[in-house]
Image: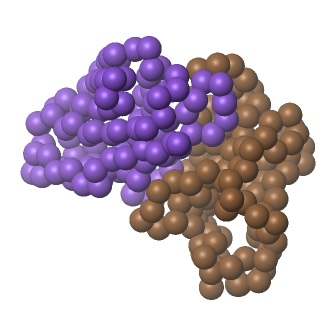
Amino acid sequence: GEDVEQSLFLSVREGDSSVINCTYTDSSSTYLYWYKQEPGAGLQLLTYIFSNMDMKQDQRLTVLLNKKDKHLSLRIADTQTGDSAIYFCAESKVNRDDKIIFGKGTRLHILP
Amino acid sequence: EPEVTQTPSHQVTQMGQEVILRCVPISNHLYFYWYRQILGQKVEFLVSFYNNEISEKSEIFDDQFSVERPDGSNFTLKIRSTKLEDSAMYFCASREDRRNSPLHFGNGTRLTVT
């Protein structure tokens, strides 16, 4: 089946790195996404990775994929107050090019 | 950068009334979606739409729901007779007609059913 799991909360000090983890159960070839949702706002696509990749880096964001363990992580370097948001992990299948399935989201709280 | 736009941003309606939520997808996108997020809960898939027909729908998307692409730019979600439990944030999304293209979401419409 399809299920995406994330921890619900993470607190990080400003300037430190944040690491948000996600596990998924579907072993089919898939795309994995990270979306950011600020309070009262929509879903902003941060980055995405195909399952034949191990890592993707984009400025302060690093995505790591361990396909064997079905584990995805998002690392935010030099966390800033503007990074405070809910981060959703999501997956989709290559052959069913329709819906994506979201995790419940991780609320990132920045400590001063 | 082109974006998905949704109107209204907030809709309040009475139980039993019909509501129509509107979306303008990105202009060269051909796949369209509606998702909803009940307050504090996960983002749930409702329906996907391609080539003027529904390609997939979830069990949430019952006979009270319908979607339409009335012209070349709008994509609407209609709820025929709203229930209290329909109160949620409704997100529209669209994507290009190619492999690897991600979904782009609008800012959502907050529906409050009283």
Q: Is residue A64 visible?
A: yes
- Given residues A102 and B37, the one toward you in this image is A102
Q: What count of labels does the image hold?
A: 0
- Residue A86 locus on image (x, y percent): 35, 50
Left or right placement of residue B105 versus residue A60 in this view: right
Q: Is residue B23 visible?
A: no
Colour applied to chain A: purple
Left or right placement of residue B102 versus residue A111 in this view: right
Point 52% across, 26% down: residue: A28
Rendering colour mode: by chain
Indicate the quadrant where residue B112 lies. Answer: bottom right
Q: Is residue A9 above or below residue B20?
A: above
Indicate the quadrant where residue A51 lies. Answer: top left
Chain identifier, brown in the render = B
- Given residues B112 and B2, the one toward you in this image is B112
Q: Is residue A41 above or below residue A74?
A: below
- Residue B31 locus on image (x, y percent): 73, 34
Point 48% across, 34% down: residue: A26
- Residue B58 locus on image (x, y percent): 68, 54
